[in-house]
Image (tube, rainbow, N blue to C red):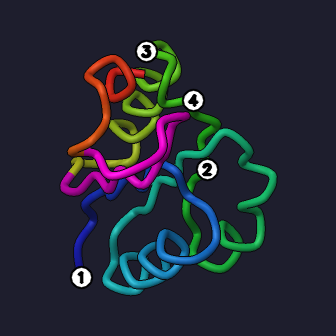
Amino acid sequence: MTSDVAIIAGAGPGLSASLARLLAKEGFRVVLAARNVGKLSALVAETGALAVETDVADVASVENLFDVADKAGPLSLVVFNASGRARGPIAHLEPEAVRQ
């Protein structure tokens, strides 16, 4: 059992939801970051996670996410599952597309 915090950015159904369930079961305080936190209400109720509206392309939004996570406890894990507009294998993307 741990009281450490895990952030899952780009939270939604599928992999990130399964990971949130697993981490919550292991005792982590889970912080779910998504642009639309309304879609996370069932997962929040199930896991006791915190949901923070976050746009990973906006620095202030990401800073707010980490401020919320800091208040929940010591941060141990960050899973970056968010996607931007760029599509395709990362090795083939132009640097500007990766920055966005």
From the viewer's perspective, tell me whether residue 29 is left or right of residue 51. Answer: left
Q: Which of these two is toward me, 72 or 31?
A: 31
Q: At 42% from the left edge and 55% from the top edge, which residue is drawn?
A: 81
Q: Look at discs 1 and 4 and give the one toward the viewer.
A: 4
Q: Return the x and y of residue 100 as percentages of the image width and height.
A: 43, 22
Q: Are marks 1 and 4 in contact (CB under 8 Å)?
A: no
Look at the numbered disc 1 and give the secondary structure of its residue: loop
Q: Look at discs 2 and 1 and give the one toward the viewer.
A: 2
Label 4 neighbour load within 10 Å: few <14, some 14-19, many 20+: some
Q: Is residue 79 located in the magenta-colored stretch of the structure?
A: yes
Question: What's under tag 4, amino acid-wise?
Answer: Asp
Q: At 71% from the left edge and 61% from the top edge, which residue is drawn?
A: 40
Look at the numbered disc 3 and give the secondary structure of its residue: helix
| Residue with the mark numbered 3 | 59
Q: CA distance from mark 1 to mark 3?
A: 32 Å
Q: At 48% from the left edge and 75% from the top edge, which residue is drawn?
A: 15
Region of the chain picked out in magenta, as a range: 76-90
Question: What's under tag 1, amino acid-wise?
Answer: Met
Look at the numbered disc 2 and give the secondary structure of its residue: strand
Q: Main secondary structure of the magenta part?
A: loop
Sooner in the amino-acid sequence: mark 3 or mark 2: 2
Q: CA distance from mark 2 to mark 4?
A: 13 Å
Sooner in the amino-acid sequence: mark 2 or mark 1: 1
Q: Return the x and y of residue 1 as percentages of the image width and height.
A: 24, 82
Sooner in the amino-acid sequence: mark 1 or mark 4: 1
| Residue with the mark numbered 2 | 51
Label 3 neighbour load within 10 Å: few <14, some 14-19, many 20+: few
| Residue with the mark numbered 1 | 1
